Image: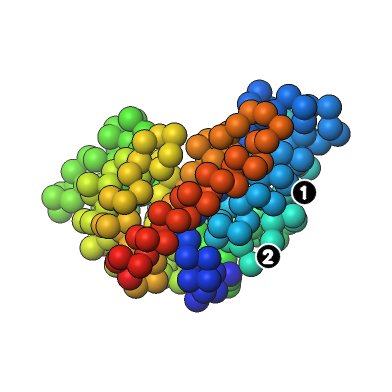
Amino acid sequence: MTRAELFSQIKAKQSYLCVGLDTDLTKIPKHLLSKDDPIFEFNKAIIDATKEYAVAYKPNLAFYEALGAKGWESLQRTIQYIPKEIFTIADAKRGDIGNTSALYAKAFFEQMDFDSITVAPYMGQDSITPFLRDGKWVIVLAHTSNAGSADFQLIESKSGRQLYEEVILKTQEWTTADNAMYVVGATRADKIGSIRSLAPDHFFLVPGVGAQGGDLAEVSKHGLNKYCGLLVNSSRAIIYKSSGEDFAEMAGKEALNVRNEMKILLDTYL
């Protein structure tokens, strides 16, 4: 998917909502557990209820890999079910040397046909460039919301910049705003403005709005650019809005509420 195609969908839906499919067998409604593939049945219902408002879906692969071959089957069925015009993110956080990264790229872009993959940049260019393919995206971990992010991301370099800032600047030597995005945690809203100055044209994938307490208005105020430039992810706050048989209906209502707030913010800042 190109940046123009993604932006076109954002404009059409007046939304930059990414729904995280962090589907946990211990949390989905009990009535689904009797199904042959409860993970897929849950995802299918969530997608049906939210696809009018979501411009992206982001399965976190840990929830699928933990189930072995059955989990991979559920993931494959899920990706095939998502409408083709909606952006898909393999939240895999892969990061390895070149030949291994190339095989990860083959797995997620050819075998599973994701539009993008999250990548840990610790191994440098080798962990980034093998994922650069026409119509595909690499989403680089930059400044995340977890407590441990300070252990490395905030280390000051010789230039006086922090390590996450060096990552953003250095990766732009190998990538463009048409094939790379950055992960920036929503609870870092106070820094999104300065991060935007480092990557003015790029999309940011912003997790942490909803259950993790990120402020959508603050993120949008500092992060929106002329192409929108944000994919704001919400997982638990939408997909687990209800644990009853009305789970999909309630997820749809919550997604609509988020989309309505996003519409106002787009009208305000774009």
Q: Nearer the viewer, residue 154 or 96?
A: 154
Q: Is residue 238 visible?
A: yes
Residue drawn 69% across the image and 51% down it = 48
Number of numbered discs: 2
Q: Residue 35: give x, y in percent of width and height.
A: 84, 32
Quarter of the image holding residue 29? top right
Which circle's residue, 1 or 2, is located before the other in the chain? 1
Number of residues whose C-alpha sits closer than 10 Å to that of mark 1, classed few (under 14), some (14–19) or many (20 or more): some
| Element on which disc 2 rests | loop
Up-down relation of residue 186 to residue 82 (above or below)? above
Q: Which residue is mark 1?
A: 77
Give the residue drawn at x 22%, y 40%: 155
Residue at image point 29% right, 32% down:
151
Q: Residue 180: horizontal and vertical position, in percent?
A: 45, 63
Q: CA distance from mark 1 to mark 2?
A: 13 Å
- Asked if residue 93 shows in the view, the reply is no
Amino acid type indicated by mark 2: Lys
State the mark number for residue 84.
2
- Marking on residue 95: none
Position of the C terminus, as image quadrant, is: bottom left
Q: Position of residue 207 (x, y in %)?
A: 43, 45
In the image, what residue occupies the spot 86% across and 34% down?
A: 36
Looking at this rendering, what residue extends furthest in the bottom direction?
Answer: 4
* Left or right placement of residue 253 versus residue 189 in this view: right
Cβ–Cβ under 8 Å for marks 1 and 2: no
